[in-house]
Image (cartoon, rainbow, N blue to C red):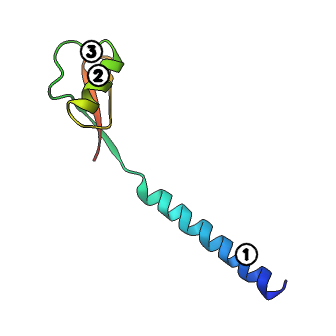
């Protein structure tokens, strides 16, 4: 292999390594908490999701088996 090919291959591996490290570091853990201000039973996940995003400024929301609205946030 000539020097240009070897240098190009090394550069490619370096770029791939750095790109992988960036992806791993940007993943955040999430936690689910009971919605603070959602009132009433939770039957529609869309309503819960809207509430969590717009009223509590969190990532998302969903109705769970206990008919309560649970919001997801970064923790």
Q: Is residue 56 left or right of residue 21?
A: left
Residue at the spot x=25%, y=31% of the render? 54
Left or right: where 19 falls relative to 63 = right
Q: Are marks 2 and 3 in contact (CB under 8 Å)?
A: yes
Q: Secondary structure at mark 2?
A: helix
Q: Is disc 1 in contact with disc 3, using a CB cutoff of under 8 Å?
A: no
Report which residue position mark 3 lands on: 42
On screen, 22 above or below 9?
above
Q: Secondary structure at mark 3?
A: loop
Q: Mark 2 and mark 3: span between their CA atoms?
A: 7 Å
Residue that sits furthest to the front in the current view = 54
Separation (CA) of disc 1 from disc 3 = 55 Å
Other residues around mark 2 within 10 Å, as few (<14) / some (14–19) / many (≥20): many
**Disc assigned to residue 48:** 2
Classify 16 as above or below 54. Answer: below
Residue 26: image quadrant is: bottom left
Picture disc at residue 9: 1
Task: Using a 10 Å C-alpha cutoff, classify the residue at mark 3 as few (fewer than 14 neighbours), some (14 to 19) or many (20 or more).
Answer: some
Question: Looking at the rendering, which quadrant does residue 9 occupy?
Answer: bottom right
Residue 16 appears at what percent x and percent y? 61, 66
């Amino acid at each position: 292999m000539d020097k240009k090919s070897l240098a190009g291959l090394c550069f490619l591996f370096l770029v791939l390594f750095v790109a992988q490290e960036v992806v791993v570091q940007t993943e955040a853990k999430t936690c689910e908490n009971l919605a603070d201000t959602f009132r009433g039973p939770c039957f529609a996940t869309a309503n819960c999701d809207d509430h969590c995003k717009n009223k509590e400024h969190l990532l998302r929301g969903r109705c769970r088996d206990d008919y309560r609205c649970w919001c997801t946030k970064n923790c």
